[in-house]
Image (cartoon, helix red, strand yellow):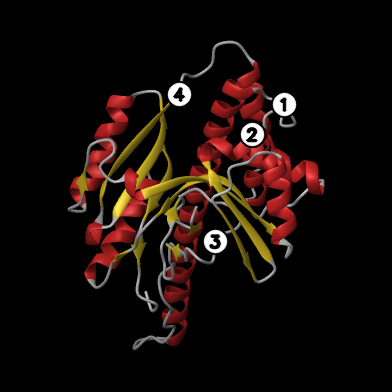
């Protein structure tokens, strides 16, 4: 599958992953939504060169300050999303990464996305304590700009609020939120483990010896990517660690991988970026997956 088909996380991050994941699958393509600073500054003034320079340089500083504020805000959102997911993962599966492989992968991914250690530690400490916040997973799906298929994953302490917020994004971008199962049957819910290597036969043998149900193994440009059903995530990862020791996983996630692509062109491209950006602005949204395929020059 070629083209820019992806999962979205954060406004400023590439997507397979709307929060940020270390590596992305080249076969699936990628889309990047970036917050751009305003354009260049003209320092020439029809009245007084010095005054014009001072005025326009001041404008440049203001633009830069606003841009930095947006960047800081985007980082804060990424930290918050990771903190919430780490907390929920540790609360349900234990705070020891060696015994909770999902947590281990999540922490490694957070570090690659430059999430500060204190954010990770705070989430783990909170999970260790009694009580705490009560988040539950919620998933919404439907059709986005250009009629592409979309799945939105959330962690929420108020499902009614979250549904209203997500539905509002669909409505404001002339998209259509659907019922459970309306598009998810067109995605494979897959565990994806990617790492440097070339011997796919050895990897397949190790996985088969551990009785892992392997969907596919890709060997491309010195990188191996293992696909397995999402229920096989822990078994597949442990089999690789047992066979090859400590590994640096470039991708270590469970994702919804689209089975088909929907071309998105023209005005729908900008509308899709707006749609994904608005979803990312929602605190409860953790991941967004879609099957949009963008033009090469988009």
- Give residue 78's position: percent from left, percent from top: 52, 45
N-terminal of the two: label 3 or label 2? 3
* Image quarter of the C terminus: bottom left
Q: CA distance from mark 1 to mark 3?
A: 29 Å
N-terminal of the two: label 2 or label 4? 2
Mark 1 closeness class: few <14, some 14–19, many ≥20 residues within 10 Å? few
Q: CA distance from mark 2 to mark 4?
A: 16 Å
Which of these two is toward me, 47 or 146? Answer: 146
At 67% from the left and 45% from the top, the residue drawn is: 208
Pair 2/4: label in front: 2
Q: Can residue 119 be seen from the camera position used here?
A: no
Residue linked to disc 4 = 135
- Give residue 243's position: percent from left, percent from top: 79, 46
Q: CA distance from mark 2 to mark 1?
A: 8 Å
N-terminal of the two: label 1 or label 3? 3
Q: Can residue 270 be seen from the camera position used here?
A: yes
Residue 127 horizontal side relative to residue 9, left or right: right
Residue linked to disc 2 = 103
Q: Secondary structure at mark 3?
A: loop
Disc on res. 96: 1
Residue linked to disc 3 = 25
């Amino acid at each position: 599958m070629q083209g820019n088909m992806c999962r979205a996380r954060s406004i400023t991050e590439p997507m397979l992953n709307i929060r940020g994941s270390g590596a992305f699958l080249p076969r699936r393509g990628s889309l990047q939504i970036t917050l751009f600073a305003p354009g260049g500054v003209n320092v020439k003034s029809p009245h007084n060169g010095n005054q014009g320079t001072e005025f326009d340089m001041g404008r440049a500083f203001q633009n830069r300050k606003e841009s930095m504020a947006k960047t800081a805000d985007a980082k804060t959102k990424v930290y918050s999303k990771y903190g919430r997911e780490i907390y929920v993962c540790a609360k349900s599966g234990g705070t020891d990464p060696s015994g909770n492989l999902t947590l281990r992968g999540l922490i490694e991914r957070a570090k690659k996305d430059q999430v500060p250690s204190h954010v990770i530690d705070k989430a783990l400490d909170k999970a260790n304590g009694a009580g705490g916040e009560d988040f539950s997973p919620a998933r919404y799906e439907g059709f986005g700009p250009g009629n592409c298929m979309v799945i939105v994953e959330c962690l929420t302490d108020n499902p009614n609020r979250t549904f209203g917020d997500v539905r509002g994004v669909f409505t404001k971008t002339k998209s259509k939120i659907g019922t459970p199962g309306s598009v998810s049957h067109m995605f494979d819910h897959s565990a994806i483990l990617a790492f440097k290597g070339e011997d796919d036969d050895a990897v397949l043998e190790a996985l088969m010896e551990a009785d892992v149900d392997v969907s596919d193994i890709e060997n491309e440009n010195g990188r191996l990517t293992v696909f397995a059903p999402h229920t096989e995530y822990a078994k597949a990862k442990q089999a690789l660690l047992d066979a090859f020791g400590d590994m640096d996983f470039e991708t270590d996630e469970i994702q919804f991988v689209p089975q088909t692509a929907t071309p998105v062109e023209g005005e729908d491209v900008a509308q899709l970026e707006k749609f994904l950006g608005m979803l990312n602005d929602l605190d409860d949204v953790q991941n967004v997956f879609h099957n949009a395929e963008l033009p090469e020059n988009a």
